[in-house]
Amino acid sequence: MEVEASFPDTLEAVRVLIAPGGAYGLENKIDTFGAIKARIGYAYGPWFFYATGGVGVAHDRLTHTQLTGNLSGYVQPVYQWRIGAAAGIGAEARLYGPWSMRLEALTLQFPKSGANFSITGQRIDSSLSAYILRAGLNYRFGGEAVKQDKALTPNLDNVSIHGQMTGIGQIALGFPSLYTGQKSLNPHTQLRDTVSATAFLGARLPTGTEVYFNPEPTQGFGLSRTQGFGGFPNGEAQKGGSNYPRYNTARLFARHVIGLGGEQEEMADGANQVAGKYDISRITLTAGKMAVPDIFDNNAYSHDGRSSFMNWGFIDAGAFDYSADQKGYTWGAVVELNQKYWAARAGYFLIPDTPNGFNFDTRLARRGQYIGELEGRYTLFGQPGKLRATGWFTRAFAGNFDEALAWTGGDIAMTRRSRPEYGFVANLEQAITDDLGVFSRLSWRSGKTEIVAWTDIDRSASMGAVLKGTSWGRPLDKVGVAGMINGLNNSYRSYLANGGTGINIGDGALNYRRELVAEGYYSIGLGGNNALAFDYQFVKNPGYNADRGPVSIASIRLHGEF
């Protein structure tokens, strides 16, 4: 017997129909489905061939959109549960020890069910069918260990399997606000949560090339659906959020290392890193789907919202408008030259086809983002430090703030064409003792055109410190404090003051002041890389508006890794 649940957020059917009240569009979308079913079959050696069947359950959303008539543009969703049948066939094969793999074909059939749309007085009936082919990797906990011929046991020295799960609950207390606009932070007390789970799967091929795949379902929204701040307070909050877990291929890339000889260093097995020895003097080529901060703007003390500071402007440089879709990933290629005391890296990445878009512009010769970085390593009073200088240039389909105000009445979409944008980042990390480290970033972008992908910051300065709990007998604990100042270019300020909106901000008016952010957290180590953290952030002038705030934000974060 088994119970299963899936959250596809991709299965949908769309149809345009005509009724006496005019034309309307009808979308039927499955948000989640599952089944309670039995498997019965025959085991032959390491194989198990089976049939499966049982009861299927689905939760779907039927959305009625009026296209013509007096109610044109009116949208009404109806949510409903359905009960149906599940049936399929499959095969499972034992690999070694507790591991097995599985391939299954399954169908779910749900009978006709109806929904009433009160605004138009219509009833819509629909039936649902789903056909699924899936492969899986299974790990069996407990029970008697399966004896395996050593000759059949694979060599795992060239394989890396890791995973993480992070859940964040965040509350923003109510604050004074003279007015509220389209992309304002809600002034009332609100509670939001986000959850992410990532598998880091990697293998080194016989050629020496490493390949990595990161499936990553996520769920939830940030405060006010991830709007209202330049420096947003939850690094796990994505612009493409969802009410139900939504699958995403976070990374799918290849890496090849060319050793140049000489001294070597050991790379431990880790997330997206197969263990092995590498020449310190080496060239590394990386290509595929990834996140730009995987390679650029790294910092040992503040670069991971799952284990350190949570604000976007502390995780990465605030004004670093790096390319990304609404989930934070893009496609590109990077070449790195590493030496003992320094490194240089350069990359090219696809950019969204419109600002904050989900699809990428594939006109390689005309559009894209170029990034270069120099990294210096040194020792100060016996403690290691790093200084990074990053520059970037983007040519994107974007609008101009001054032109939008001058001749389109504020409609920036009418000014969009191929435009250049550029900026820089200075990034410092310095160990003070074995347990105490400090960091600082300065970032700037020209700010004449729309932000392409990251967040609404044109200038940013941040600094902070992280202390491990060794001195009070808690070496796995750590405490961090940091502060940040964010600002906007004059052109962007004028655009917002005249009612414009950006990626995450837009109050309908603007009494401009710099956005000030302070953050502190205490992380309780639970063994390994697992931790429970408590975080507090204070933001003055959220969204650069002195007529709103300040706001206090408290968070609790549970993070686990294997």
Image (spheres, rainbow, N blue to C red):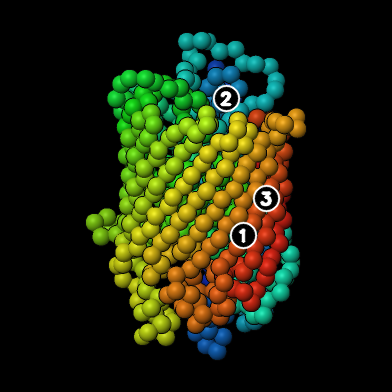
Using the image, determine if residue 537 lies above or below residue 121: above
Disc 2/disc 3 C-alpha distance (Å): 42 Å
As drawn, the residue found furthest toward the front would be: 381
Quarter occupied by the C terminus: top right
On the image, which quarter does residue 182 sit in? bottom right
As drawn, the residue found furthest toward the left would be: 365
Disc 1/disc 3 C-alpha distance (Å): 10 Å
Using the image, determine if residue 5 lies above or below residue 488: above
**Disc number for residue 520:** 3
Q: Amino acid at mark 1?
A: Val
Mark 3 neighbour density, 10 Å: few (under 14) some (14–19) many (20 or more): many
Tell me what residue is drawn at x 42 percent, y 86 percent.
409
Residue beneath disc 1:
517
On the image, the x and y values in percent for residue 521 come to 69, 47
Element type at mark 3: strand
On the image, the x and y values in percent for residue 295 come to 42, 42
Tell me what residue is drawn at x 31 percent, y 64 percent.
420
Residue beneath disc 2:
99
Q: Which of the two discs, 1 and 2, labels the residue nearer the N terminus?
A: 2
